[in-house]
């Protein structure tokens, strides 16, 4: 089954299997792939399955849809094509390549370094300290967890073998870590650190 990988900058936001004949992309919440960004139209584009072909149609969007850097109205997608919608990239991976990868990957025993990487870091959470979601806790179970709101302010917390780091992804909001500005350069996180993003305070908690 073909899929698309949605990312912004170097941060992967989500992966979506193209299981339907029509997969819609847009800012409105009823789309199959929702991208909450002002540069994206409410109903921006649609990915259609037609036999063995996967076709991308731009739905007369305001800012256009691009494939590999070129504006398109309608185009048959090839494996590895990069679709650009606003600041977001959507990489298309054909079902043939997905199946081929599954067949060619041979499991092997983890090395000592890999075992150590899997064993650390210790699980962590983000606890919201202010705002309407105060008290809410988010477990950092993924390799990359994004926090904030697209088009307003977004930061990403990444899990590495030696701990967690945070960096600014997009928007304003003047994100800070313990009062110091967070930039696009990853900064290590320590237990008890306080992140402030668009007026909301969050605490990094690691057991």
Image: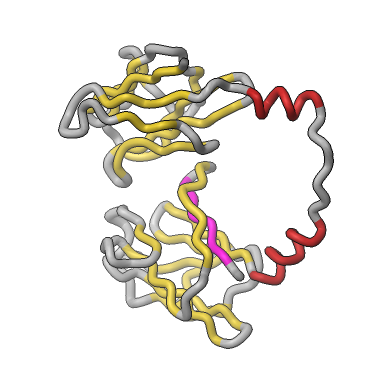
Quarter of the image for residue 44 reads bottom left
Above/below status of 187 relative to 67? above
Q: Is residue 198 left or right of residue 105?
A: left
Whether residue 4 is in magenta: the answer is yes
Q: Is residue 80 left or right of residue 206?
A: right
Q: Is residue 86 left or right of residue 72?
A: left
Q: Residue furthest left?
A: 132
Which x, y percent locates residue 156? 44, 34
Asked if residue 68 shows in the view, the reply is no
Judge by depth and name the residue closer to the eye, 204 or 151.
204
Whether residue 167 is in magenta: the answer is no
Identify the colour scheme used: secondary structure
Quarter of the image for residue 45 reads bottom left
| Residue at x-position 46% and y-position 32% | 140
| Residue at x-position 30% and y-position 70% | 43
Above/below status of 132 relative to 61? above
Magenta stretch?
A: 3-8
| Residue at x-position 64% and y-position 72% | 78
Which x, y percent locates residue 64? 38, 68
Which x, y percent locates residue 59? 35, 77
Which secondary structure type mostly characterizes the magenta part of the structure? strand
Give the total of numbered labels.
0
Which x, y percent locates residue 179? 31, 13
* Quadrant in which the N terminus appears: bottom right
Judge by depth and name the residue closer to the eye, 163 or 125.
125
Judge by depth and name the residue closer to the eye, 150 or 17.
17
Asked if residue 89 shows in the view, the reply is yes
| Residue at x-position 31% and y-position 54% | 36
Judge by depth and name the residue closer to the eye, 3 or 196.
3
């Amino acid at each position: 089954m073909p899929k698309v990988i949605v990312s912004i900058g170097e941060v992967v936001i989500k992966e979506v299997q193209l299981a339907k004949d029509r997969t819609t992309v847009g800012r409105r919440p009823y789309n199959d792939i929702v991208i909450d960004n002002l540069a994206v139209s409410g109903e921006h584009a649609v990915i259609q399955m037609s036999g063995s072909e996967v076709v991308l149609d731009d739905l007369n969007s305001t800012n256009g849809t691009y494939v590999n850097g070129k504006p398109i109205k309608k185009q048959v997608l090839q494996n590895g094509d990069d679709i650009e919608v606003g600041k977001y990239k959507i990489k298309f991976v054909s079902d043939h390549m997905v199946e081929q990868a599954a067949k060619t990957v041979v499991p092997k025993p983890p090395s000592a370094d890999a075992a150590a990487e899997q064993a650390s870091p210790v699980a962590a959470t983000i606890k919201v300290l202010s705002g309407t979601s105060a008290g809410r806790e988010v477990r950092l179970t993924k390799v990359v967890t994004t926090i904030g709101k697209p088009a307003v302010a977004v930061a990403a917390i990444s899990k590495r073998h030696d701990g967690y780091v945070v960096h600014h992804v997009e928007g304003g909001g003047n994100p800070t870590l313990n009062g110091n500005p967070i930039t696009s350069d990853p900064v290590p996180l320590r237990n008890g650190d306080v992140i402030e993003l668009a007026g909301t305070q969050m605490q990094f908690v690691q057991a």
